[in-house]
Image: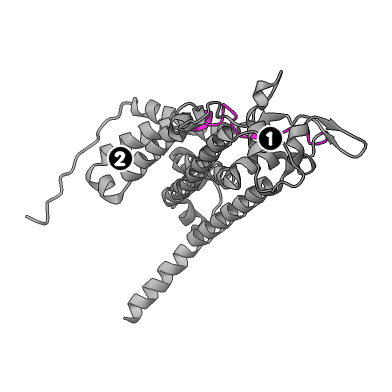
Amino acid sequence: MIVQALKNIKLLKNEIPRYLILGVWLLINLIAFLVVYFSFHNSLKYFYLRKIVQDGISWSRASAFCINLNAAIILLLVCRNSITYLRSFMCCSPNVVRVIDKHVSFHRYAAYLIFFFTIIHTIGHVHNVENFVEAKNAKFKPFEKNTNQEDLSGLFSTLSLLNKRPNGTFLNPVDTENAVPVFEVFKLLAGVSGIIMCLSLSLLASTSSENIRKSFYNLFWYSHQIFALVFMLFFCIHGAQRIVKIQTNIKTHNPQQCYLIYSEWPVKTETKQCDIPEFEGFTPVSWIWVLPSIILYLLERLIRFIRSLRKFKLARFIKTPNKSN
């Protein structure tokens, strides 16, 4: 019993660095999520977008940042040649080497986080699309000084019609009245690519279980190669349509001062200036996060392929007796 307890203590001591790194990485994800969330929640640039979709944009963008963060490292953790080089040619203590040898476990942890934040991201954007459809269906009502500030249907209608103006920029990607949210998703590159990524991620997760890996390893391996490629491809183009908009003329249109007088835009007095709000798409950056790891991984695959072409000579073959017979 004492010997077993000592073994457990030694095992725990050996695993402390791994769980310490995991804890730090989880903390980094939490801090990143909160920073991005409150950035979108408080920034004037997203004031009108928040009015339409509420905090759905904050949840979806914060989770998107964490997905980028984990996607940036998930391929690096399975670049075996690079990891072997790092392990062999760096002066590392046994504890560091032991942590490096756990790279597949860290790969799985990153995958779990991507899956978790994808759920949040998807729910957030489903909420956003439904609110965009409702905003498009809103009827215009002129501003009244005594109106209830919570009734913003007139504002939503005005914002949804901005692209109808000469040289107008749109905030609401839904351009059809009485639209069905599901159909609107399939009109957007972000929607189609998002669905494909969710399906790919589900297949990756389901074929990565321990039972599948042990009993049907080829299924696990080929599904990983195919669906990881599909996921990364659509991951890179997911934001290319630039659906998320930021306001670019805050100086000439302060939304906190101007949003209730939407029926009078543009307004310019001695105390207030409210030009027509202008918007531009949020620059997609997901591909920047994953491009270095994709390049390194493809180089790794090329090296493995070249090595597989080498001929080798079998020096000898020894057959050992089967103890079960």
Give the residue furthest to the right.
270
Where the N terminus falls, by quadrant? bottom left
Q: CA distance from mark 2 to mark 1?
A: 42 Å
- Number of labels in the image equals 2
Instruction: Please provide percent x and percent y for residue 109.
Output: 45, 51
* Mark 2 burial class by Cα count in 10 Å: few <14, some 14-19, many 20+: many
Q: 111 left or right of 324?
A: right
- The image quarter in which residue 310 lies: top left
Q: 75 left or right of 4?
A: right
Which residue corresponds to mark 1?
A: 246
Query: Measured along the vertical axis of the image, is residue 133 above or below residue 14?
Result: above
Instruction: Please provide percent x and percent y for residue 84.
Output: 46, 43
Which residue corresponds to mark 2?
A: 220
- The image quarter in which residue 44 lies: top right
Verify whether residue 49 appears in magenta.
no
What residue is drawn where x is 57% and y is 47%? Answer: 59
